[in-house]
Structure formats: C-alpha cells, structure tokens
Image (cartoon, rainbow, N blue to C red):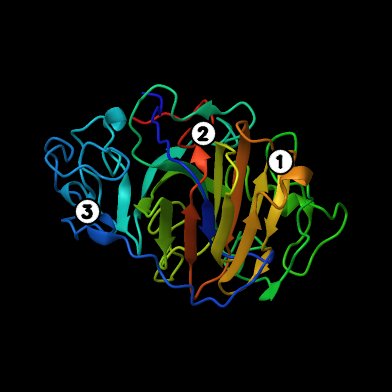
C-alpha cells in the first residue's frame, strides 16, 4: 500500500552531520534522553505480535515503545502491525538500529525511474494517518570509486572542506544545483557525476526509503547516530568494508515558522540545508564531523519568512569515505508532515 504516515511536533531544529557553515569542535555532548531515549537490544526482529501495542507510549504518541518492537542492528521489524499504526519501527523495515539517541530503519527499495526523490510533486507522507512512526527520507547507495565501475566522487576524493559545491538556490526539481557547470571542485568531478547523488540512476545507485526516530528532551527533538550505517549489506553491499560507507541521504519536509527557531547539524561528510529553497548551511567536502548552525529569526528577512506560515525544509547529506559516519538532528521546528516521498513509493 502507499506509504502514508504522519508525525507532527513543535519547535527548534538542530541537525548533526558534516557542514561548513558554522563550525564547532566535534565533541558536541549527546543530549540525555531519559527512559525513552534508547531501545533495549532486541532479537533481530523476532517480535511479531501486536506491533508493540503493549509498550508505554513514546513522546510522539506511538502506540508502542521502541523496546517492544526493536530488533538488534541489522534485524527486521515485527511484521504484524500496519505501517499506519503509529509504532516504531515501521512494519517490514530492516536494519533496525538503536542509535545514540533515537534509531533508524531501512525500508523498501525504490525502483529507478519511479520518482527521483521528495520535494516537487512528492506525496506528503503524513496526510492520512494521525500517528507517525518516524521522519521519512531517501538513501541512495553508490559503489566506491576505488572499485570497478565505482562513482568517482566516493572514497577517492581528497579529504578537505569544499564549500560552494552547490548554488544558493534549490533547483526547480527540489534538488541541489551544481554551481560549477563545465568545471569541478576539490572533491567532485563535475556536474554529471554530482547530479547522480540525489537522482535515481540505474546501475549507478540503489534508492531506499529510510525512517528516522527522533526523541524528545525538553521540547527539543533529537536524532543522533554516531555510527550511521543504514545501508549495511544492501544495494552494492559493504564492498569489503565493515560497513557500507558510500551513500547519500535526502530529506524533504515542511514546518510552520513560529519565531525563535534555530537549526544545527553535526556530522560528516557533506551536508546542505535549504529553508524556503535557500541555502542556509553549507558543509560541503569530504571531512570529519563538523557543525552548521542557522538562526531562523536572524535570517528571516533574506529567507522571506513570516510567522504563522509554512515553509519547505530540505536536507542533503553524503557519506563518502570510510572511517566514520555521524548524523545528528536536534529540532523544535513545527513540522507539518513526517517526510515527503515520491508518489511512486509504496510499502509492500
């Protein structure tokens, strides 16, 4: 059936991955999550009962708590609850992993050509169901550039900050626009290869649905993965590495601007964040974990924001090098959906 889930919550947004907008030391302390912050290790998805209905409610009104449903890393979710039932993890998702704060799980593969990503023309993943089991995104797996047929931008690029890879305005297709037509940058090999990062290209990438579970702490909602490997064993596989290190992440959602919000991202490698289709965080390059921060009030005039109105938020991430993978989000933004996915996306 078509993916149809809803997740709404108020306030400030902080995203942790890799960025070059505003930098801070990588040792940003994790936010304490209390009793609901971490799921107890499961049994690889062996729970198949009522979808966690007997667990205590989570901060987002899920029907069950994470421990009642979660499998160990790499495990599958229980299969007897419906996707719209409001439990974590979504039924049928695999690689269910408890992260430092919250968790993530991998959904079905998206057939190439069936829709290039969220944004323009995308379905609202939260318009039909009152409860939401996560923030939905797309992840695309690539072959490392040091393997036959690999992508030149992954693994083989030099390790260096590389701001300015993308233009300040999001494209009409809701994708980043390569800012160097006819040229290259320190860590990219031109417009053609870059345009493959966030579009479905047969034999170049494999696209999957991704679910992120955020946890509330004092009105801040956090997802923090210090080991962010949603595609382990999937797509082109781990290519001889302990994890799958070559992938991109694409998130599209919308929020109601209330005033006072901010957005911070900590992680590696590239991260670009757009609000109202304008670039607000640029952490381009193949680098260790960095931090980008945007204060929405300070940039409201240049972003065209007015309180009480709804605006787009788009986040584009790339993991391009072995060694580490960090991804952190902290937010109080008032999201009005739980992710926008291509109309073609279905969950068996």
Answer with the quarter of the image where residue 121 lies: top right
**Residue 277, numbered circle:** 1
Circle 2 packing at 10 Å, graded few (<14), some (14-19), many (20+), is many
Q: Give the CA distance from mark 3 to mark 2.
A: 25 Å
**Residue 150, numbered circle:** none
Of the numbered discs 3 and 2, the one sitting upstream in the chain is: 3
- Residue 138 x, y percent position in the rendering: 50, 44
Of the numbered discs 3 and 1, the one sitting upstream in the chain is: 3
Q: Give the CA distance from mark 2 to mark 1.
A: 17 Å
Mark 2 vs mark 1, foreground winner is: 1
Q: Are marks 2 and 1 in contact (CB under 8 Å)?
A: no
- Residue 152 x, y percent position in the rendering: 67, 63
- Residue beneath label 2, please? 341
Q: Measuring 30% from the left and 39% from the top, which residue is drawn there?
A: 90
Q: Measuring 42% from the left and 55% from the top, which residue is drawn there?
A: 222
- Residue beneath label 3, please? 71
Mark 3 vs mark 1, foreground winner is: 1
């Amino acid at each position: 059936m078509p993916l149809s889930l809803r997740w709404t919550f108020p306030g400030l947004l902080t995203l942790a991955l890799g960025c070059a907008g505003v930098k801070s030391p990588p040792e940003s302390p994790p936010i304490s999550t209390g009793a609901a912050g971490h799921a107890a290790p499961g049994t690889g998805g062996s729970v198949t009962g009522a979808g966690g209905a007997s667990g205590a409610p989570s901060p987002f009104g899920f029907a069950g708590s994470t421990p009642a449903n979660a499998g160990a890393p790499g495990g599958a979710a229980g299969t007897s609850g419906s996707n719209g039932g409001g439990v974590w993890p979504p039924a049928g998702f695999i690689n269910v992993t408890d992260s430092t704060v919250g968790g993530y799980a991998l959904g079905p593969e998206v057939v190439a050509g069936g829709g290039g990503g969220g944004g323009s023309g995308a379905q609202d993943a939260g318009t039909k169901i009152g409860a939401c089991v996560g923030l939905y995104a797309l992840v695309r797996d690539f072959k490392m550039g040091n393997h036959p047929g690999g992508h030149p931008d992954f693994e083989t690029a030099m390790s260096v900050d590389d701001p300015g890879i993308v233009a300040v305005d999001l494209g009409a297709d809701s994708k980043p626009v390569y800012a160097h037509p006819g040229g290259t940058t320190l860590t990219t090999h031109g417009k053609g290869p870059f345009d493959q990062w966030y579009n479905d290209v047969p034999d170049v990438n494999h696209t999957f649905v991704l679910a992120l579970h955020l946890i509330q702490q004092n009105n801040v909602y956090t997802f923090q993965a210090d080991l962010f490997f949603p595609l382990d064993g999937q797509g082109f596989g781990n290519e001889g590495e302990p994890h799958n290190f070559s992938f991109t992440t694409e998130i599209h959602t919308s929020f109601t601007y209330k005033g006072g919000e901010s957005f911070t991202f900590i992680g590696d490698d590239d991260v670009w964040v757009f609000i109202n289709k304008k670039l607000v965080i640029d952490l381009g390059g193949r680098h260790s974990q960095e931090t980008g921060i945007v204060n929405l009030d300070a940039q409201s005039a240049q972003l065209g924001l007015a309180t009480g109105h709804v605006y787009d938020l788009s986040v584009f991430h790339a993991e391009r090098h072995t060694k580490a993978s960090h991804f952190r989000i902290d937010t109080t933004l008032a999201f009005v959906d739980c992710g926008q996915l291509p109309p073609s996306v279905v969950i068996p």
